[in-house]
Structure formats: C-alpha cells, structure tokens
Amino acid sequence: MTSLTINILLCLYLLANHVSSLTLELVSQENVIRPELERQSEYRFMVKIGIGTTPSQKTTTPYKEYFLHVDTSSPLSWLQCEGCKKCFKQQPTKPFPKTNSKSFHPILPSDKLCLTKQTDGKYCTYKIRYDENSYTAGILAKETLFLGTNFDNLVFGCGMEQNRMVYANNAQNKIAGVLGLGWGPLSFVTQIESISDGKFSHCFPPFKLGRHEKHKTRLRFGADAVSSKQNRMTTKLHLIGSNPFYYVELEGISFNGQRLNKIKEDVFRAKYTEGGVIINSGEMFTQLAKPAYDVLETKVDYYFAKLMYKTKVGSYNRRCYMKANTTRHRVPTISFHFKGSSGARMVLKPEALFTDLYNDSICLGIYPNDKNNMTIIGAHQLINHWFTFDTKNSQLSFHQENCYKNG
Ligand SMILES: *[C@@H]1O[C@H](CO)[C@@H](O)[C@H](O)[C@H]1NC(C)=O
Ligand SMILES: *[C@@H]1O[C@H](CO)[C@@H](O)[C@H](O)[C@H]1NC(C)=O
Ligand SMILES: *[C@@H]1O[C@H](CO)[C@@H](O)[C@H](O)[C@H]1NC(C)=O
C-alpha cells in the first residue's frame, strides 16, 4: 500500500523530533524474533501475531492470533477492532475484542504518545490514507503484542473505520490489519528498537503453483536481520522527516545486460512530494515513472515480437505476452542500478519479473505510473533477494538469495 497523499504527512507532522524522547517500556525475554512469512496471494505477504490478554477456556494462550500484512510503507501497525463502524471481511477471525483485553489501554490526547495530536474528544486518534480512497482510522492504544516473545505497551491503531483495502477483495481474506514496518516513531521497527537496533530484513520466496514448501522464510530483526553473505550490495536509504517511505536512489535500468541510456536518471528523482523511488512490500507489483516505463516496454515488446509472441493487457494494466507455440518461454532479465560505491545492481530473474510463467501467457510485474511519476518497487520484484533495512545507519543492503532455503 502506498500512502500517496499528504494527509499522513500532516497527521504525523512533528513526529520526527520525538523519536529519541520516546521511552516505551518493552519487556522481552529473548532477543530473537523471527515471525514466519506467509502469503495470502502470490505476492502479498503476512505474519501471524498474537495480541491482547483475553484468557479463554478454549485456548492455552492469553492472546488472540491474527494475520497482519507486511507493509514497509505503513508508519503504524493497526488491526480491525470490535465495534468498528466500517470494516472489511476477515476470516476465520473476528475484529479484535479490545474491551475483553486486560492489557488494552487507549491513549489519551494528553499522553506524550499521542503523536498524531488528533482526538475524538476522548481518545487519541489516527488516520492513515493509502491510495486515493483507501484508509484506516481509529484510536491509538497500547497493547501487548506477541511475536515469539511478548512486547508490552506497544502502540498500535485500533481500526474503527477501514475503507477499500485491496486484500479485502479476496473472498478468503485472512488479513486483519497491517504490521507497520515503514519509517517513523510509531513504526514497529522503531518501537522495538531495543531489540531491532533499527534493523529488519525480508527475503520473499517466489510463487510456485501448487507447491507446499517445507522451508520457512522469516521476517528478521536486529543482528539476525544482517546477512553474512559477502556479496552484499549497499545503497543509501533516505529517511525523510515524517514521511513513512523508504526512498532509494535508482540511477538506471538494464535490459538483458544492456543499459537503457534513453532512461534519464532524473525521472527517478523526488521533486517535493512527487517522483522518487521507494521500496514497498505493501504493493504487489512495481510502478515505474511513465517516461522510464515507456522505454522499457518498447524494449520488451521488441524482444517478444521477434519470438512471435502476441501482446495483450493483463490485471493491473500490465503488459502480457503470449507465446506462439509450445516451446519453453525465453525470458529476458532486467536490472535496477542503485547508487552505490561499487554499483549496487539488482538483477531481476524471470520469477521476479513475470507472473504466470507456467502459462502460455506471461505478464510483466511492472506497470507505468502516469499519475505522479513515482517509482514504487513492489513485492514481486523483491523476491529471491535478501534485503536488510538499517534505519539507524540509513542503509539498504541486499543480495540475491534462494529465499526458500535461507530466508
Ligand atoms: C516456436 O516459436 C519460437 C519463437 O517464439 C521459435 O524460435 C521456434 O522455432 C518455434 N518452435 C516450433 C516447434 O515451431
Ligand atoms: C492462462 O492463460 C489463458 C490464456 O491467456 C488465460 O485465459 C488463463 O486465465 C491463464 N491461466 C492462469 C492460471 O493464469
Ligand atoms: C512525468 O514525467 C514526464 C517527463 O519528465 C513529464 O513530461 C510528465 O508530465 C510527468 N507526468 C506527471 C503526471 O507528472
């Protein structure tokens, strides 16, 4: 998900300076938290968390379990709460029964944790806007979260009004909210800083039809998130005030090893609130600034035309290519070149570039952004790479990885 509007900038304004003054009383017995990554659909990842203290005779655990969408563009974790006025369907769970939880503490407007400075008259409130009409709004509260270990008094959004979340369109939607891994004082990573040291990693495995993988791939925090591989590449992470996004500097794109010189570097630069390049696990696919996309599409079209493929339009307005006969697909590679001392190149292999590779018609996981020329690198393009976000040192490091084996 992308919070494209300025709203969030306004509502979380003034927050950046408060980071160091926050003292959250986190209690934890262990230093390693590694929630398992699961997928709801091909490129939408989620983790299971426990929340609250609601002892029940049916279960031995005091918390309730929910799946949260792993979103590196969300500055706050939130969950649909009981009594919500507007909520999407989640199953098999029901919205979080906050009133039954002994550890649920709504934040008051006078509390220093009320960083949004918004109130409904009684409690501190929040609102996060994602794409256009999609938003979540509710009250800020402290709760105990369980992710392999307990975190007491974690600030989260108790969602009372949710509108147009894309995953809610899934008839079997299990997602009940978001794990906010974006930048900001209320981000999950920041709140557990005593353990995370501002670091987390993900390694998304590719989608394999009908295959149940026995290997687990995990979200990691702190020292555990730092890969020991020598072939790591590094680029600067730009953390901009109260903006929840992780910005990176993209310098260019290659097609089958050849740099596309027609793509000028400045199409990737941020101009005020438009343009720029972000890494966002909350989006399924990549949106490229329109001028860059057009150059790339021409190349890909030409490549497949020579192989007699036919073009057509797929979901998300993506370009699809249908082969002429039953021979195997011959798929090109695309690379992203990030700014970095020794050339931080990210090579997209077929599984990170096309969907439906098992079908006659394959579709590019990249589409143009002609709304604001912002470039957003989404989850499909992030698969089979290990990414470590280091918010304290403003660094993103990555390397190619078989995420099923070593995630
Ligand atoms: C199938 O199409 C490819 C080009 O897309 C061509 O190179 C190949 O010779 C064709 N194979 C057959 C058996 O027609
Ligand atoms: C495979 O391609 C055909 C023809 O384009 C399409 O109708 C079908 O939905 C595709 N199947 C899947 C699973 O994507
Ligand atoms: C996107 O960038 C191109 C080239 O800089 C520019 O001509 C176009 O107006 C931009 N589109 C939007 C919506 O800003």
Image (tube, rainbow, N blue to C red):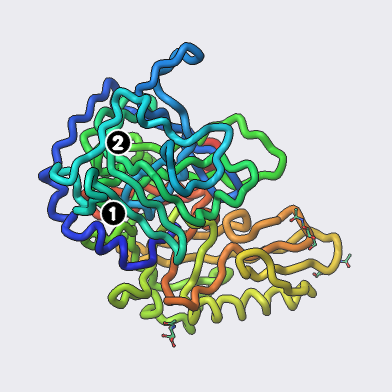
Q: Is residue 208 left or right of residue 220?
A: right
Q: Residue at x 55, y 80 (%)?
A: 294
Q: Position of residue 292 (x, y in %)?
A: 49, 78
Q: Is residue 39 visible?
A: no
Q: Residue at x 18, y 35 (%)?
A: 24
**Disc number placed over residue 395 in the picture, else none:** 1
Residue 25, located in which quarter of the rendered image? top left
Q: Is residue 217 above or below residue 152?
A: below
Q: Earlier in the sequence, mark 1 or mark 2?
A: 2
Residue 153, located in which quarter of the rendered image? top left
Query: Dot 1 lies on which element?
Result: strand
Q: Nearest the camera: 49 or 336?
A: 49
Q: Residues within 10 Å of mark 1 (few under 14, many from 20)?
A: some
- Which residue type does callout 2 highlight? Ala
Query: Dot 2 lies on which element?
Result: helix
CB at disc 1 and ligand 3 closer than 8 Å:
no
Q: Position of residue 272 (x, y in %)?
A: 28, 75
Q: Position of residue 88 (x, y in %)?
A: 52, 47
Q: Nearest the camera: 40 or 175?
A: 175
| Residue receiving disc 2 | 223
Q: Are marks 1 and 2 in contact (CB under 8 Å)?
A: no
Residues at marks 1 and 2, CA–CA distance in whole angstroms: 14 Å
CB at disc 2 and ligand 2 closer than 8 Å:
no
Q: Residues within 10 Å of mark 2 (few under 14, many from 20)?
A: some
Q: Residue at x 47, y 76 (%)?
A: 371
